[in-house]
Image (cartoon, rainbow, N blue to C red):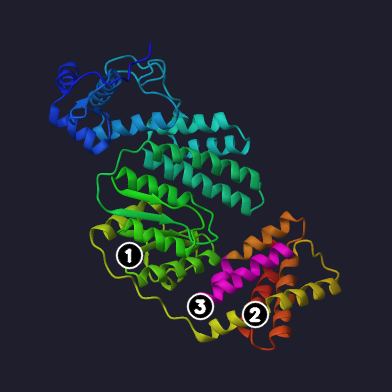
């Protein structure tokens, strides 16, 4: 039998039916958004039978030893997974009742859960992947599952893809499952209880929004008012949003060198209008020295540490770190290369064709390497690109091109730079030759 959601009972009836104290009930409503009574025109609360059963459910969880915050977490997790906690066929047992389901031992092991979830995603098994996440949320907090199962799982998918052990389709499938679950959890969070507004956004050309979805969820669970603008936000549109929302903090995320350049541009614009900014992302975690090139607050290397850092900035705003200066030689090389990049790539193509080398991979490799070279130079250090050499190697593998072609490709690219830029790109060609020589020795280890 369904439980009525028609608002019928005043607060005195609710207190009699549940035994809860009025102050406690109001605190739950204010802090956790449960229950959610309707109001009469005069402002008096009206509760439904469903609201009363919700209160009893939460009190039963407390009787089992859970804190009220954890009980609310469990409620929101079950709502997010598509099940009603008050459905007696699927609800948790009431205090003192016999438990009808015992999760297998593997369901309490985060590593096992993550491994099983990835296996289900690689089989494109939506139901099993969702079921495993439900198991994980049943015995762990939202934060633990999101970081240790979902986030780490997606990181491992990315590593498999880089090594040629997972397809783009498998990576997209796992990301889709994870994104939908986070969006459900975000939708189930209670209304904000803090006045400050936080804006989350990706800079232009950055499409990886998952890290910001996690920040969105965690901040909302801490009571903050969050506006998530999503992927590839133009700088001018960000400025318009700032005028409307007046945020206390803007958080940006970038995953590649090229989008790190766009992030820096956005941060500079925010600094000019006096808006506090913070940033993070995989590219900043992987490349030493790169965060110092961004005039904003770096949020640390993990999501778990990012949220306390954000709350510290909101509680005690402070001036942004100064941007580390960039040498004129790097900026000049970047400008010269950008101006004659098409000529360099044409010279490269001609040279490889003359050698009889495979060229099927050239368009993608040239686009990636050229964009990254320009970004690394604009950020002040061409060695920032070193960590991406493995990506190009696996690109070649994906095109069935022997990895041994990579040092040849880099060496020919270096000579094309020398030929076209006539010494103006020495910083580029020297680095490419160094990479080629190193890979010539060790390419079989990639």
Residue drawn 23% across the image and 33% down it = 29
Where residue 338 sits in the image (x, y, percent)? 63, 77
Name the quadrant of the C terminus: bottom right
Could you tell me what secondary structure mostly forms the magenta stretch? helix
Crowding at dot 1, Cα within 10 Å, few <14 / some 14-19 / many 20+, comes out as many
* Element type at mark 1: loop
User: Quick check: can you spot residue 166?
Assistant: no
User: Quick check: can you spot residue 82?
Assistant: yes
| Count of marks overlaid on the render | 3
Q: CA distance from mark 1 to mark 2?
A: 34 Å
* Element type at mark 3: loop
Q: Toward which corner of the image does residue 394 lie, by quadrant?
A: bottom right
Front of the two marks 2 and 3:
2
Q: CA distance from mark 3 to mark 1?
A: 24 Å
Q: Give the magenta part as a residue range.
A: 363-387
- Left/right of residue 164 with respect to residue 401 in the rendered view: left
Q: Nearer the viewer, residue 431 or 54?
A: 54
> Counting residues from the N terminus, which is met first, the one under dot 2 or under dot 3?
2
Q: CA distance from mark 2 to mark 3?
A: 18 Å
Q: Which residue is mark 3?
A: 380
In the rendered structure, are the residues bearing label 3 and label 1 in contact, judged by CB atoms less than 8 Å apart?
no
Where residue 27 sits in the image (x, y, percent)? 18, 35
Residue drawn 68% across the image and 73% down it = 436
Instruction: Identify the mark at residue 339; answer none if there is no mark.
Output: 2
In the rendered structure, are the residues bearing label 2 and label 3 in contact, judged by CB atoms less than 8 Å apart?
no
Front of the two marks 3 and 1:
1
Residue drawn 35% across the image and 57% down it = 244
Q: Which residue is mark 1?
A: 276
Q: Nearer the viewer, residue 259 or 348?
A: 259
């Amino acid at each position: 039998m369904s439980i009525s959601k028609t608002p019928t009972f005043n607060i005195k009836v609710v207190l009699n039916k549940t035994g809860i104290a009025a102050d406690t009930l109001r605190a739950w409503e204010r802090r956790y958004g449960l229950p959610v009574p309707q109001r009469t025109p005069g402002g008096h609360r009206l509760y439904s039978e469903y609201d009363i059963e919700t209160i009893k459910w939460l009190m039963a969880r407390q009787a089992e030893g859970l804190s009220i915050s954890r009980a609310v977490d469990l409620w929101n997790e079950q709502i997010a997974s598509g099940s009603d906690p008050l459905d007696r066929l699927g609800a948790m047992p009431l205090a003192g009742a016999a438990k009808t389901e015992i999760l297998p031992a593997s369901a309490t092991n985060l590593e096992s859960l993550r491994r099983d979830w990835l296996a289900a995603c690689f089989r494109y098994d939506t139901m099993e992947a969702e079921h495993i996440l439900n198991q994980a949320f049943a015995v762990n907090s939202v934060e633990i599952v999101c970081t240790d199962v979902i986030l780490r799982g997606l990181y491992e998918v990315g590593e498999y893809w880089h090594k040629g052990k997972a397809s783009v389709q498998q990576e997209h499938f796992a990301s889709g499952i994870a994104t939908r679950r986070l969006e459900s959890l975000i939708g189930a969070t209670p209304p904000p209880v803090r006045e400050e507004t936080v804006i989350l956004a990706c800079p232009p050309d950055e499409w990886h929004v998952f890290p910001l979805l996690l920040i969105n969820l965690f901040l909302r669970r801490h009571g903050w008012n969050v506006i998530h603008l999503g992927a590839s936000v133009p700088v001018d549109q960000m400025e318009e949003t700032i005028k409307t929302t007046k945020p206390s903090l803007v958080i940006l995320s970038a995953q590649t060198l090229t989008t790190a350049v766009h992030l820096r541009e956005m941060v500079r614009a925010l600094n000019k209008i006096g808006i506090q900014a913070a940033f993070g992302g995989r590219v900043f975690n992987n490349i030493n020295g790169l965060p110092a090139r961004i005039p904003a607050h770096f949020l640390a290397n993990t999501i778990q540490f990012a949220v306390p850092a954000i709350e510290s900035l909101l509680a005690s705003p402070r001036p942004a770190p100064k941007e580390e200066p960039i040498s004129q030689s790097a900026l000049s090389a970047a400008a010269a290369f950008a101006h004659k990049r098409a000529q360099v790539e044409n010279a490269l193509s001609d040279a490889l064709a003359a050698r009889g080398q495979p060229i099927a991979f050239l368009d993608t490799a040239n686009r990636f390497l050229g964009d990254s070279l320009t970004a690394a130079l604009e950020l002040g250090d061409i060695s920032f690109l070193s960590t991406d050499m493995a990506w190009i190697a696996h690109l070649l593998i994906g095109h069935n091109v022997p990895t041994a072609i990579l040092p040849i490709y880099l060496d020919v690219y270096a000579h094309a730079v020398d030929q076209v830029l006539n010494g103006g790109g020495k910083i580029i060609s020297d680095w490419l030759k160094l990479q080629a020589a190193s890979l010539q020795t060790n390419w079989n280890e990639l």
